Image (cartoon, helix red, strand yellow):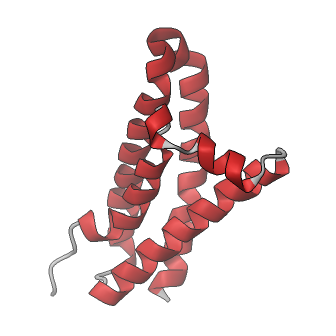
Amino acid sequence: MRILKSLLIWLCFIPVAILNGGFRQYVLDGILGKGALPASGILLSLLILLVARWLLPRIGRLSRPERYAIGTLWATLTVLFEWTFAAMEGYTLPEWLAACNPLTGNLWVLSVLATFLAPFLIPQKAKP
């Protein structure tokens, strides 16, 4: 049941990511130029951790296997969500993978890693 509840938390990442993209496009691009893309990736990673820190403790104490399952689920859903929208925009898989290359400044991979690790990085409530 906790894993199902964690899906609601993952859904909160979507508007955060969309707002982050808008912030990059309308604010950071004008200030940082080419540095906006990596800055946005770092910011998104921090925002994901912040949302997880705020919401994940509300579903209760998680076992290590639950943390692993939630992190895996979140990361998988994130990749599938991004790939779906890229495919809808006409990107082929090789084009999308090239666009996600961290060597080009796109740190989206960092946000996927943060999404996976968030359940492990969030402090657990003490047992009663």
Residue 62: horizontal and vertical position, in percent?
31, 83
Image position of 74 (left or right of 118): right
Q: In the rendered image, which quarter contains the C terminus? A: bottom left
Residue 44: horizontal and vertical position, in percent?
45, 42
Residue 31: horizontal and vertical position, in percent?
46, 10
Number of numbered discs present? Answer: 0
Image position of 33 (left or right of 51): right
Residue 126: horizontal and vertical position, in percent?
15, 79
Residue 63 shows in this picture:
no
Find residue 53 and report its image quarter. bottom left
| Depth check, front residue: 59 or 35 | 35
Residue at 60% of width from left, 52% of height from top? 14
Q: Relative to residue 9, is residue 27 depicted above or below?
A: above
Residue 89 shows in this picture:
yes
Residue at 61% of width from left, 29% of height from top? 22
Residue at 74% of width from left, 49% of height from top? 86
| Depth check, front residue: 97 or 2 | 97
Most distant residue in the top direction: 30
Q: Relative to residue 84, is residue 76 depicted above or below?
A: below
| Depth check, front residue: 32 or 22 | 32
Residue at 60% of width from left, 23% of height from top? 25
Image position of 57 (left or right of 9): left
